[in-house]
Amino acid sequence: MSSVVTLYVVDYNSMTKEHQDILCSNGAIAALAPLLASDVYKVQMPTLKCFAVLCYENENSAAQISTATYNGESIPKLLVRLLARDKTSEMQIAAAKCLTYLCRCGAIEADSPTIVLKTLPTLVRMCKKDRPLEENVEGAETLAYLIKVDPVLQRAAAISDHIMKALAEYLKYTDIEQIGSRTMKKKDVNWGNEMRQAAFKALASLGANDEDIRKKIIATENLMDHVSTAMNSQNLKVQIAATRCLHSLSRSVQQLRTSIQDHNIWKPLLKLIQCGDEEALAIASSTLCNLLLEFSPSKEPILEAGAINILADLTSRSDPALRLNGVWGLMNMAFQAEQKVKLQIVETLGSEQLFCLLFDSDTNILMKTLGLLRNLLSNQQHIDDIMGSYGNQVMQAVIFILEGDHSVEVKEQTLCILANIADGDQAKDVIMENDDILKKLTSYMVHSNVKLQIAAILCVLNLVSKQDEGAFHRQERLKKMGVQKLLQQLLSTQDATLFEKVKQALQQFT
């Protein structure tokens, strides 16, 4: 009497990490391994899908799968064998998915032959026009996931078998005749949308880090027209994928100044941010931050379209990623901005929300908020105006951060804000009237970290500068606190940058 094995494969999204761990700890890997080596196709295929579900975004189970063996062969070796061209396309892509997920979890090195010479070429091959539409979509999506975070794999994929040309073809499948001429298993799917979103995902990953690759992508025929059209699509998947592609391209200074500007792509971007979908909002607001960089021609029209209100609203969201994008965008907008723009940012955000962000538990948000404050507090007139209205709150936040358990980077940025304030005209008095701040400055002048010493001395240098009115009285006050003696002691430093700043500060004292 023969036995029948039934494997139930669930969707990746419905399988939680807890479920994966339970299955692995109860022997699922050892039970599945023999089935992977089976000669029965109907056993191998669901086994491959089970392995893919088990190791998807789970480092623990991926590590166990990568080290498990059957008959002396590791699971990855068994998977590579199933990539062979004499296997069906369905099996090749299923095996490539397993290896992709193992790689993304760190269980297989990205530069290993298994990935570079076997998995990646298999996925590229699945993007060819001679494959069914299902395989085109699955191949492009899996390739996008594989190379998303690794520049070496991105470069390897970019030179693999005309992949960009193949992906460009995906964007042309918009009418029934083109799609109807291709092989497909499912007829009730909008393959135009599926092909476009898969292509945009793959192009986004290809261009994530390398400027030369971005240039090749942007040179693709009518690409920006396709991106613009897709961002205005009624299909959310297509919109988000096109925005991901735009996000990659917007990391290029050249593209910000040329192709992206020429197509007014910021208009559908703002529309997408206001549509309400959380996933769309995250990637669209991140892209908006790039379009607000100082050298971007889109910055001015985006500002006029109400971007400050949009970004200020994001800073109060519960999702840390959205708060980060909100404050990041405002930081970019404040850089070398006119006084009226800076005041609009402060008024729209509100001092209460600004200082809430300074106390955010997320270090990235704190750093960008400090960056925003530093950009706001530049230009003497701007510094004096902002400190005239919010000086007490700024000082409280500075003291809180300098006394807190924060990284060197956070404290250095905070001391640089103090140095900016000390460059103001009337704002200098806000520092000089605050004993706590002055004591903090002297303590950081002799800190064990040279970066913090340099930042503290930059502040002192601005306070004692001879050319500024009231310099003599500030110098006398700081002398009584021992600042001049500390500077003289620091002349023995071995750090060239610190020595130069100390010397400059001492030269100011009369």
Image (cartoon, rainbow, N blue to C red):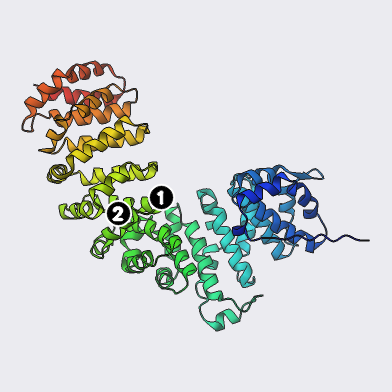
Q: Vertical placement of 232 versus 495: above or below? A: below
Secondary structure of residue under mark 2: loop
Quarter of the image where one finds residue 465: top left
Q: Vertical placement of 168 versus 420: above or below? A: below
Q: Residue at the location (28% across, 21% down)?
A: 446
Secondary structure of residue under mark 1: helix
Q: Position of residue 180 (x, y in %)?
A: 60, 81
Judge left or right: residue 326 versus residue 338.
Answer: right
Q: Is residue 292 visible?
A: no
Q: Are marks 1 and 2 in contact (CB under 8 Å)?
A: no
Q: Count neighbours of disc 1 (C-alpha within 10 A) and say few if under 14, some if 14 to 19, many if 20 or more.
A: some
Cα separation, mark 1 vs mark 2, equals 21 Å
Judge left or right: residue 26 versus residue 253.
Answer: right
Quarter of the image where one finds residue 473: top left
Whichever of labels 1 and 2 marks the residue nearer the N terminus, that label is 2
Q: Position of residue 101 (x, y in %)?
A: 62, 52
Q: Which residue is mark 1?
A: 320
Q: Position of residue 175 (x, y in %)?
A: 52, 81
Q: Amino acid at mark 2?
A: Leu
